[in-house]
Image (cartoon, rainbow, N blue to C red):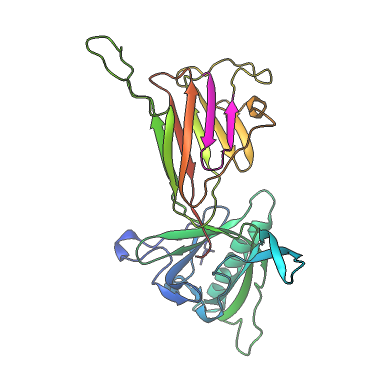
Amino acid sequence: MPIIAAPVVIPPDTGEPPGGTPVPLPEIGYATATYIDPSGTVWPLTDEAAGWFTLADGVSGLGATPYELTSDPHPRGGARLRHVQPQPRTIVWPLFVQGKDHTEFLQRWRALATAFTRTLRRQEGPGLLEIARPDGTRRQIRVYYQDGFEGQAKRGYYRDADSAVISLWCEDPYWFDPAPWTVTRETGTLSSFFTPYPTVSSSQVLGATTVHNPGDVDVWPTWVVTGPASSITFTHAGTGEAFTLDPDAPAIGHGSLLAGEKVTISTDPPRVRFENGDNWIGGLDWPAATLWGLEPGDNEVTFALSGSGPESSVNLTFNARYETA
């Protein structure tokens, strides 16, 4: 029998999500769980038909993010909170693996072990643990294998079944919605003010707009600006933070963005790339530039493109982040 290596997907006509039938999970209620390894292979975790399934009673680490609080003594007694630092989280996930005989069991056991431990290979990176609700909503978190993929050494185990209690380490403790939120503003068709009658041209890309962050914590968006534009300024009205990109700054010397040319600005990590991959980080107005994030709820922001034209647009993308699964 071949080792499971191809993506594992529940057929669409079963009426079930990829993780199998929803089961009660501690801290979050009924959900299905799926693990996506760094190669993109999908492993259902709550579907007994797969040959392995989650022992839900031992699952932990799906609740609110752990925090470390820093405080200063107060002269009148007690203390005052100075700083709050989110901490990496550890998720404990027990798995029961079985097969119709030792050979099938061993193939599944080894394949699952490789799927989790490959997250520690430098060239591959983390896997994704996904929790899906019966209403179709999903949340994911990036995970690294820490320890626990070993047999329980109980009598009769490791012949055709065994269980592993896996610890998954998450450098970013927040869950995120895998479906990105996108806000797009474009310059409408420009027209003469005088011919044939007085009109006002659409310039949505030049002005204030409200961006809603539905998550629990700040997010750090990515901006894609399409020219023409001679200068690009984005301002968060609530905090006063802003940054300006000059395509003709001495560190770049490109000149104005031409129609159809694109530049991508990432806020975490800070990065500015022209469409050909050139590094344009030197075009920001340092040291005043602040690549700001979006707070939970409504954010009043301003998009300002000098030298914009009919093809100018701004595309803002982010994935909402949450405290719990």
Quarter occupied by residue 203: top left
**Magenta-highlighted stretch: main secondary structure?**
strand
- Residue 44, how many percent across, how many down? 47, 66
Residue in the foreground of this view, choosing between 81 and 143: 81
Residue in the foreground of this view, choosing between 163 and 214: 214
Q: Residue furthest left?
A: 196
Relative horizontal placement of residue 53, taking residue 149 as reference (left or right) = left
**Residue extent of the magenta highlight:** 230-245
Q: Residue at x 70, y 51 (%)?
A: 122
- Does the magenta segment cover residue 231? yes
Relative horizontal placement of residue 129, taking residue 198 as reference (left or right) = right
- Residue 213, how many percent across, how many down? 46, 49
Q: Residue at x 65, y 29 (%)?
A: 281
Residue 315 vertical position relative to residue 23 in the rendered view, above or below:
above
- Does the magenta segment cover residue 177? no
- Residue 212, how many percent across, how many down? 43, 47
Q: Residue furthest front?
A: 76
- Residue 292, how many percent across, how many down? 58, 41
Residue 107 vertical position relative to residue 276 in the rendered view, above or below:
below
Residue in the foreground of this view, choosing between 222 and 4: 222
Q: Residue furthest top?
A: 195
Quarter occupied by residue 198: top left
Residue 91 vertical position relative to residue 36 in the rendered view, above or below:
below
Q: Residue at x 43, y 68 (%)?
A: 32
Number of callouts: 0
Relative horizontal placement of residue 20, taking residue 253 as reference (left or right) = left
